[in-house]
Amino acid sequence: MDGLLLVDKPMDWTSMDVCAHLRNVLHEKHVGHTGTLDPNATGLLVVLAGKGTKLAKYAENDEKEYTARMRLGTVTDTQDIWGTVLRQETVDVSREAIETVLDRFRGPILQTPPMYSAIKHRGKKLYEIARRGGEVKREPRPITIYRLELTDRDEAGDWGLQIECSKGTYIRTLCADIGEALGCGGCMSALRRTRAGKFTISQAHTLEEIRSDPEGCVLPLDLIQQEVQGT
């Protein structure tokens, strides 16, 4: 089956778990995605099936949009709340202080990839090295934050962020870096991808919906070709 699927990835699934599941659902061995979502993240995962997998490299450069939550005062080894806590303190940072710092992260910036990532070093993924207690030097990479807006503060004290960014942006690292800039540390406590290129979460289907009607959820490949061509 050749086509495009827009999946609302559930929590606790890796992006490759979703692809493996869809191989069985679609009875198609060639299934891949155009941009990884962490297991603890939810939201839009663009999946290509059959001949569509050949277009993946063209769609990987798409801009992304996320809603995230940031917990200040907590620093972990994974830069999110699911890692080992390295430092923790109760803080009360004002909206004004955060807004002042956010401006440093808008536009073209350099970001150092986290150790808990799939980037390879001498043939091994960084997270594999990190899980064994290792660490390697990572060079900062250029990324662009097109939009970074502070929204609400929830009952747990976590701040909401709206982010539009370029390929290769780690939202976990962004939260951690904002926390460091504020002098209290921070980490990501939730993440949801709401857009990839021209595709939005409102167009996505849950895995249950796809299982119920696989053919009805598969979109034609010309949509991804239009995305590549910018039309």
Image: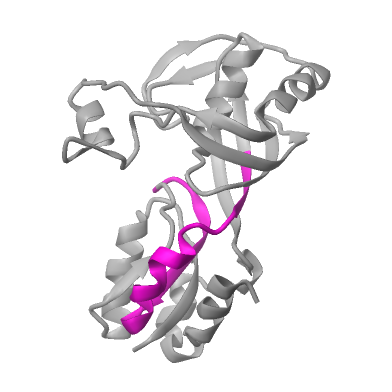
The magenta stretch is 39-68
Residue 186 visible in the picture:
yes
Q: Is residue 140 magenta?
A: no
Q: Position of residue 196 (x, y in %)?
A: 57, 61
In terms of image quadrants, where is residue 79?
top left
Residue occupying image coordinates x 70% and y 31%: 155
Q: Is residue 28 left or right of residue 231?
A: left
Q: Position of residue 16 (x, y in %)?
A: 31, 59
Residue occupying image coordinates x 46% and y 79%: 4
Q: Position of residue 181 (x, y in %)?
A: 62, 15
Near-viewer residue (124 or 96): 124
Residue 219 visible in the picture:
no
In terms of image quadrants, where is residue 157?
top right
Q: Is residue 154 left or right of residue 30?
A: right
Q: Is residue 192 left or right of residue 18?
A: right
Give the quarter of the figure containing the C terminus. bottom right
